[in-house]
Amino acid sequence: MMGSFQPSNFQLLYLLIAALLDCNMATQRPCKQVHRLNINYVQGDNMSFSCLTTTHPLESLTVKLRRTDPIKDILMYSDTSPASEHQRWSVRNDAGNVTLDLKNISFSDKGRYECQVYKDLDCLNATLLNLRVRECKILDSVHATSDSSVLLPCSEHPLQHNAGQVTWEIIIGHKPTKIDEYRPPNKPSNSTERDTRPLYERARIIGNGSLLIRDAVNTDGSWYQCRVSEKTCYEVKLVMKEITDAPTSADIPVVQTEGNIDSSAAVTTDLTAVVMVTIVSLCVLIALIICVSLYIRKRKQNINSQRLDVPLYSVVQRS
Ligand SMILES: *[C@@H]1O[C@H](CO)[C@@H](O)[C@H](O)[C@H]1NC(C)=O
Ligand SMILES: *[C@@H]1O[C@H](CO)[C@@H](O)[C@H](O)[C@H]1NC(C)=O
Ligand SMILES: *[C@@H]1O[C@H](CO)[C@@H](O)[C@H](O)[C@H]1NC(C)=O
Ligand SMILES: *[C@@H]1O[C@H](CO)[C@@H](O)[C@H](O)[C@H]1NC(C)=O
Ligand SMILES: *[C@@H]1O[C@H](CO)[C@@H](O)[C@H](O)[C@H]1NC(C)=O
Ligand SMILES: *[C@@H]1O[C@H](CO)[C@@H](O)[C@H](O)[C@H]1NC(C)=O
């Protein structure tokens, strides 16, 4: 009985140890360093980014990509199973870069991802990717001066005419607002700016979809958005240059930054104060000197007259 029990006992122990070892072996070593990356794309763009630069052939690596908000596996390279539902994602080795590609980015792609690359069980690199997706493509800023006419484009390329209907909005506090409904904020103070007509009276859309703004004023400086179709839109920033007409010496501080204005103003006040204090103290000093000399003189006279008086009086008394 004992003879038949002992071997099975050993077998059990062996199995246990083997399982433990196996468990240890199968555990991938966690990634030591995690890199963070923020990237911005516009809807419809193709994205590609490198998770690792390596000399290893791609076939010897395991590439894992998952969303982290909430956690959802997206892609596992070297997985021989047929392409997943996410056919827009792919992995390639671009001359030493393990590169992830995402085609035709949509709004729903925005979020956080984690890309891990393993060689056997060693994590070679991990990247946390924060993908932001913008709806509209950003065009180069347009610079203009007051009173000039400005043309805001609604295309990356020069256009003679635009087939579709283009709409324009001004972005106020991250929110597109119809130009018709936009009312500029109250003017800060009396500036050289005259009372101007509201933006919607001065702006119109021309043939190729550009927005023409006449007699531009400083409050026109803002982000604008134009929409060509449901999927295509652009954002462009209008930057108004500061008034530069007839700069006098008094105007110069206006061009400086706020800090400079403050400090130069403070310096001017300090100087004025110093001059005032000096003048006042000089006056006080002069007055004091005059007073003191007058007093001394008077005292001297008094003493003299007393000296003259007293002896005479005493002489008279004594006599
Ligand atoms: C994205 O790639 C596809 C082909 O892979 C191409 O047809 C398309 O023009 C690209 N889109 C952009 C915005 O580059
Ligand atoms: C790891 O990934 C980060 C971010 O993608 C990258 O900057 C870094 O060069 C990578 N490291 C290696 C060894 O490839
Ligand atoms: C690998 O990617 C990095 C950054 O993503 C890039 O600077 C480098 O040129 C790429 N190398 C090759 C061989 O494509
Ligand atoms: C890109 O994705 C949109 C949906 O998000 C789809 O309507 C469009 O046809 C796709 N474009 C290409 C080139 O695959
Ligand atoms: C639109 O047309 C105007 C002239 O009519 C031209 O000056 C401007 O460059 C054009 N804009 C674009 C984006 O094609
Ligand atoms: C500001 O405007 C008021 C009337 O609106 C005027 O009385 C005042 O003189 C102006 N001040 C300056 C500095 O222009």
Image: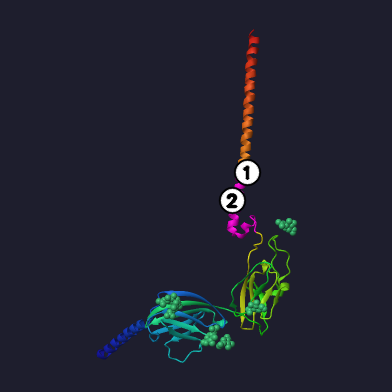
Q: Amino acid at mark 1?
A: Met
Q: Which mark is residue 60?
A: none
Q: Main secondary structure of the magenta part?
A: helix
Q: Nearer the viewer, residue 113 or 21?
A: 113
Horizontally, is 208 left or right of 117 in the view? right
Image point 63% across, 59% down: which residue? Answer: 254
Residue 219: give x, y in percent of width and height.
67, 67
Determine whether label 1 and label 2 are within 8 Å by CB.
Answer: no
Mark 2 lies on residue? 267
Quadrant of residue 24 within the rendered picture: bottom left
Q: Between residues 225 and 78, which one lies in front from this camera angle? A: 225
Q: Is residue 147 above or below residue 164?
A: above
Confirm or reject: label 1 Cβ below 8 Å from ligand 6: no
Q: Position of residue 195 (x, y in %)?
A: 73, 65
Determine whether the residue tagged by mark 1 lies in a helix, strand or loop: helix
Q: Quadrant of residue 188?
A: bottom right
Residue identifier under label 1: 276
Instruction: Identify residue type, mark 2.
Output: Val
* Range of magenta residues: 247-274
State the CA–CA distance, disc 1 to disc 2. 14 Å
Who comes first in sequence, dot 1 or dot 2? 2
